[in-house]
Structure formats: C-alpha cells, structure tokens
Image (tube, grey):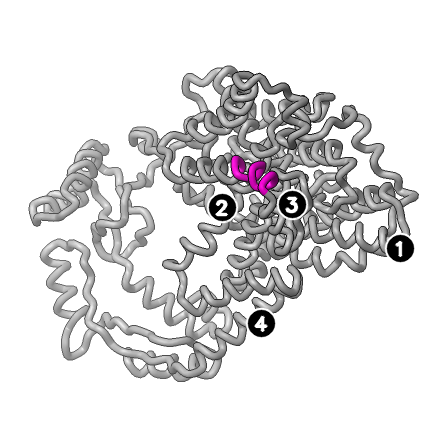
Amino acid sequence: ITSSHKIFPRFGKLLRYAIMASQPQTYGSTQQTSNVFRSLHSSGSQNNERVRALRGVVDEMPEGRSASLSGATRGAPQCNYSELPLSWNDREEKEKIPASKYSANKGGNHTMFHYLVYAIINVIIAVPGLYGYASVIFNHPAFSSHMNALAKLVIFSSFVHQLGFVIFSSLDFAIGTVQDAGLIFLSAMSNVIANNILDAGGTIDEVVSTTLVLLPLGTATLGLVLIFLGKFRLLDIVSYLPMPVIGGYLAFIGYFCLEAGVALCISKSMTTFSDWKYLFDLHSLLLATPGLLSALVLTIISRKATSDAVLPIAMVLIPTVFYVVLFVCGVTLEDAREVGWVGKEAPPVPVQDLFHLVDFGLVHWGLISKCVGTWVGMVFVVSFASCLDIAAVSMDMGEALDTNKEMVTVGTSNFMSGCLFGFTGSYIFSQTIFTYRTGCHSRYIGIFIMAAYLCVCASTINVLQIAPLFFLGATLIFIGYDLLWEWLIDIRSKIFLSEYFILLTTFVAIQIIGMDFGILFGVVVALVEHVASTTHRESTLERVTKRSRSVYPTDDWNILQSYGYNMDDPKIVTLEVKGPVFFGSSQKLLQDITDEIG
C-alpha cells in the first residue's frame, strides 16, 4: 500500500480510505467498555482469562476516563481479541498498570556490584570472540608475527564502539563491539593489500601500515554513509538488496568463521576449500576436535538453555577444564605449547606500541582503488545487518525503536572507530538483549565493559600464549555453527523454495568466484527469478464475504447489518487482490475497484 501510494496517489488514497472506514471506534466511557468485556466473557470466549484480567483493570479506572485499544482509531465500537493490552489516554493512569516483562526497570535495587557482574559476563562472552575476529581479519600469513598487537587493536576498536553507544545510543543497556557482518569484507581487503604489496616486492611493514590505514579509512567512511542514511531517513535503500542474497552471504560468514576457527585450533592458515586437507593429519585432527566439540556444546546451550547465565559459565568452564587436565596429567604449559595446544611465545605489546605499527610513509595509497568494490558491498551488508540487529532488539523489548536514529548511532561509533585505527562494528543484539533482560538498564555496565577492554589492551600478557587455542577457535566455530544452521537449515521453512535456491546459489557463488562477484551474481539470479515468477501470473480482483468480528451494542449492530452489509446495496465491501501489482496492471486494478464500489 505504501509503495502504491507513492507511485499512484489515487490508488493509495483509495486504499487508505477503505482501511480507515473499516477500523471501528473505541468506546468513550469506562462503563461501555466494561460491558463489552462482560459480553465477551458471557459469550464463551476462549480468552476468558485475558478478558477477566482486562475487565478488572477497566473497572478500576476512574469514571470518565476513556480506554482505547492499542492500534484502534475512532470509528465504531470494538473489542478485538488481538488488540491487547489496554493503553490509557491519560498518561497519569498508565502508572497504575502493573509492569510487564517489557517494562524498563531503570531503578530497582541494583547496585554497582550488579553492574560490575553483568559487565564481566559480557566481557567473558566478547573477548574470546574478538581474538577470533582478529584471526579472521588478518588471516594472511603476512600478519602472523604481529597477531598479538593486531588482536589488541580489535579489542581497542571494540572499546571505541562501546564508548560511542554509551554516549549516543538511546538504549542505556546497549552493547556494541566489532561485529561479524563486516569481517569477510575486511579480510578480503587485507588479503588484497597483502598480496599486491608482497607481489610487488614490498615488506611486511608496508603490508601492516597500509592495512591499518585503509581498513580504518573504510570504516570511517562507512560510518559517514550510515550517518547520512539515518539523518535523511534513507534506510529503505538497503532493503533493495534481496533477502536471500543477504542470507547466502551470512551463511558464508558462518562457513568462514568455522574455517577460521579450525585454523586457529591447528595454528595453520586456511583460506581455500582445499585447506581442509589439514584435518587428514591425525595431529591436526586431534587439535581441532576439542574446538569442534566445545563449539557444539556452546551452540546447544545457546539454543536450549533457559537461563542467560549458562553460556558464560560454560565459556569459563571450558578453559578451566583444560588447565585442570594439564595439572592432573602433570603436563606443563610449555609442554602443551610444544604440542600446539597453546600459542607460541611472543614479546609483550604495550598499549602505546599499538599505534607505532603504522608508518604513513609506507602506505600504498594507490591500493584504495582495488578496495572500493569490496567497500561498497560492505556498506550494503553492514547496513542491512545493523537493521536486523536493531529490529531484533526492538522485538525482544516489545517496543518500537527509531531505526534511522539508532543507525546514526551505529554510524557515529564506526566513524569514531575508523578515526582511531579501528574496524567496523554495530549493536551486538544477543548481548544487548541479555543485558536488557537482567533489568540493569544503566550505562554503567557499558562503562565497566570499556574499562575491561582497556585493561586487556594495557596488559602485557599475551592471551594467545596462555589460553588454549581450541577454546579461542571454538568461539569462532560456535558463531559458524549458529549462522550455518540459521541460514542454511532453519531458514528453509520460512521462505519459498525459489528464494532458498537463490540463497544456496549465492552461498556457492561466493565460494567459487569470490565475495564481490558472488553477491552480484546472487542479485542477478534474484532479479531473473522475480521476473520469471511474476510475469506469468495476472493480478485479479475478487469480492469476498467478510464481516467485522467486533462486538457492538444492539442499535449499532442493527444499523451495521441494515446499511453496512445490506445485500442489495452494501456500504462496506471486502475485495481480495491476488497476484503481483505492476505499473500496467495497477491501472486496470484501480478501475476494477472503482467499478466494484460504484
């Protein structure tokens, strides 16, 4: 209806008139509304318990107050079963309604200790994954000698993102870090940069300097684009990218995280499908198996556990069990390092040395042109993924969020991150929802998380040389399992077979011809499928028999039957449109509607 109204004002106006005419009015007095609920209750409604509760609330309203059902407009009286709960026209009366599970609990009895505990839980969940993200972005062998510093740079970037959300987000409980949606694009750009420089005889320092300038530059410009889209409310542009194509890309992210997680477990670079041959080596298979199984356990817990505390507890227990086994078996950390269970020793990296990695004199600025195509794809996908994150948070809260406003926040945090040599990020909806459900709706949690990130960055301890590699790999494999299940298996029952075919085609195409051309190929296939599936069907208009299910007083009911639904000259008709509506068919459809209603 919205798109029709934009293209054909008369058609859209006609539809809006029909909708407004069909929406009944709410009762203006408490007594009438209460009578409706009593009538519903006595008529044997299946919603007796809900009606009973609502009737009690309405009866308690002061005489003269008007209760309106959410979403209703003024027309004829109604009591629609689905239009719950009640909302008072008087804001003061709203405070008397018992708080629902979606109500914000900003006060409560929470103390700084509670905020600290929930912040620690979020950090436990995030930090291992951030180390995994670093291994994805910098998966080229040229970065291996600087991996400790690069991982800390990813964590520092998450600190900047969280700072942006603490300052600018409308949600006090917002959690934001480097996110998985942009990982593959960042990885693709880092590989292009490394390959071009090394092929031209360049040095590792040139690779690192160029990468740590061009990737943050892309992140900052991405942030500006998101701010522009949000400020001018242009996010509808993102919706033109077909959902099955996005699904195929997200499934590829899952596969890529699975591959990167296994590579982290066995300490080998895996960038092509043929690299899975490493698992035919028994030693590599032994190193990867605990990571694959641990990730499976985390996946089951995340989907089946009823308590949000189970997942972080499991993430603490996995490395704890590893150290206990080492102690019981009498194996030292050095022995485990020689076998490959933990990372190799590397000199500590003070926080001030992170920015010494960049030498602007070594930057190959000409490589910007080779990254532009990948950057454009990153803008679309990160924008789309951020919209999904915002929508997921909104649905869990049960409250509408201004997507454009929240996108400005995401853009601002990305701009800040890029200016400080950081990488793309967004809302982490799972952690944001977790924090929301705790009831601790305070920005202190975000501040404590930022402090923890700074502590990790300032520490001279190399996490990669003390933490079990299979655990760090398991956090990536866990993300991979989850995305692959959601976008290759679970999605099948939610979309048409033709759309699922596009999703699989995009997923395979990215594997074969690369990410940029794979996504483009998926879009082309989606366009062809859309044209093929719609042109052979005509749009039809048919009058159907439908009547209001609302409950009316006797006088109003008689008027409605005599005039509204009169068989000879009905004032209310229901028309059902089938098939696609295009530019040409819409004019005929408009004429048919006009003829039907006279």
Q: For the point 50% across and 23% down, which residue is it?
A: 321
Report the Cα–Cα distance between label 2 and label 4: 28 Å
Magenta stretch?
282-291
- Which numbered disc covers residue 200? 1
The reply to whether residue 393 is visible in this rendering is yes
- Can you identify the residue that label 4 sits on? 524
Report the Cα–Cα distance between label 1 and label 4: 35 Å
Which quarter of the rendering shows the C terminus? bottom left
- SS at badge 3: helix
Lower sequence index among marks 3 and 2 = 3
Q: Is residue 100 above or below residue 18?
A: above
Report the Cα–Cα distance between label 3 and label 1: 35 Å
352 or 167, which is in the foreground? 352
Left-right relation of 368 to 29: right
133 or 596, which is in the foreground? 133
Report the Cα–Cα distance between label 3 and label 2: 29 Å
Lower sequence index among marks 2 and 1 = 1
Lower sequence index among marks 2 and 4 = 2
What is the x, y in percent for residue 119? Answer: 54, 24
Name the residue furthest front. 282
Lower sequence index among marks 1 and 4 = 1
Which quarter of the rendering shows the N terminus? bottom left
35 or 547, which is in the foreground? 547
Q: Amino acid at mark 4?
A: Val
- Can you identify the residue that label 2 sits on? 481
Q: Amino acid at mark 2?
A: Tyr
Report the Cα–Cα distance between label 2 and label 1: 38 Å
